[in-house]
Amino acid sequence: MKSETYSLSVIVPVYNEVDLLGNAISAIDAVVKQNFENYEIIIVESGSTDGTGELCDALANAFTRVRVIHEGARNGFGSALKRGYSAATMDWVWFVTADTPFPLDAIVEAKKLFPYYDCILSYRSQDTRKSLFRKIQSVVYNAIVKLLLRLRVKHVNSAFKVFKREVIQSLPLLSNGWFIDAETLYWLTQRRVRYIEIPVPLIDRAGGHSTITLSTPLSLLKELQNFLRQRRTMR
């Protein structure tokens, strides 16, 4: 059943996802179309080298609700998200990566909570990833970030998040990398934004290649260190 009460912007940041992006956009469009009368899908493409840029333009021609922002260079996950957040025009903003790491119908459950909260976050009710390294990395990173930033969320980097547009656009986000998830949660906490965490399973990617590498934890720690230095002047 469609809702005329809320509109939705879907942000899809992509870099070299030519194998996954077409199916992802088709699936996202189908789910959102069934549940929102008014919506847009904004693909932020960051200088891909595998044909993803051309595919994005083809998808924008094929789907009336899809538009594309070409960053022109690979500036980082956080940079792409910020471009998408700034461009969003609907009531609520939801970001989904091309590997669709959670069931897309989680947005249906989240929508039921829109009248009561300013953002809907998630915790991992199930983790089907095969990489033991990624699981250990996530546990360690979550523990460090929650301690240093005094966050009370269950999972800092759980993938499903949806925000009121005016809330996400008001945050002074600086991170251009993967630290943007933690930075976002920090500002939501500091500003006492009403949020709730719902259980959403994490699904391992079905194809393509993750841009997370062995050096990613070091980059995250550097971003965290820089943020801790800057945050006093950002309040």
Image (tube, rainbow, N blue to C red):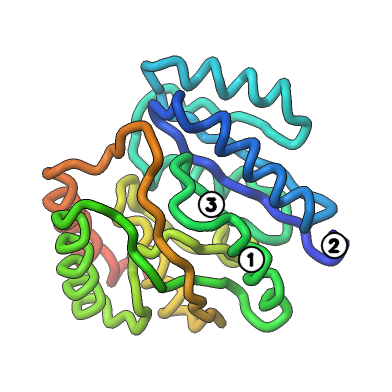
Q: Position of residue 176 (x, y in %)?
A: 34, 45
Q: Nearer the viewer, residue 48 or 55?
A: 55
Q: Secondary structure at mark 1?
A: strand
Name which of mark 3 and mark 2 comes first in the sequence: 2
Is residue 28 shown above or below 114? Answer: above
Tell me the quarter of the picture where residue 166 sits.
Answer: bottom right
Query: Residue placed at 64% from the left, 18% from the top?
Result: 58
Residue under label 2: 1
Q: Is residue 78 left or right of residue 210?
A: right
Is residue 201 shown above or below 11? Answer: below
Residue count near mark 3 (Cα–Cα under 10 Å), binned few <14, some 14–19, many ≥20: many
Given this view, does label 1 or label 3 mark the residue nearer the observer? 3
Q: Nearer the viewer, residue 171 or 221?
A: 221
Q: Secondary structure at mark 2?
A: loop
Q: Position of residue 68 (x, y in %)?
A: 61, 29
Residue under label 1: 164
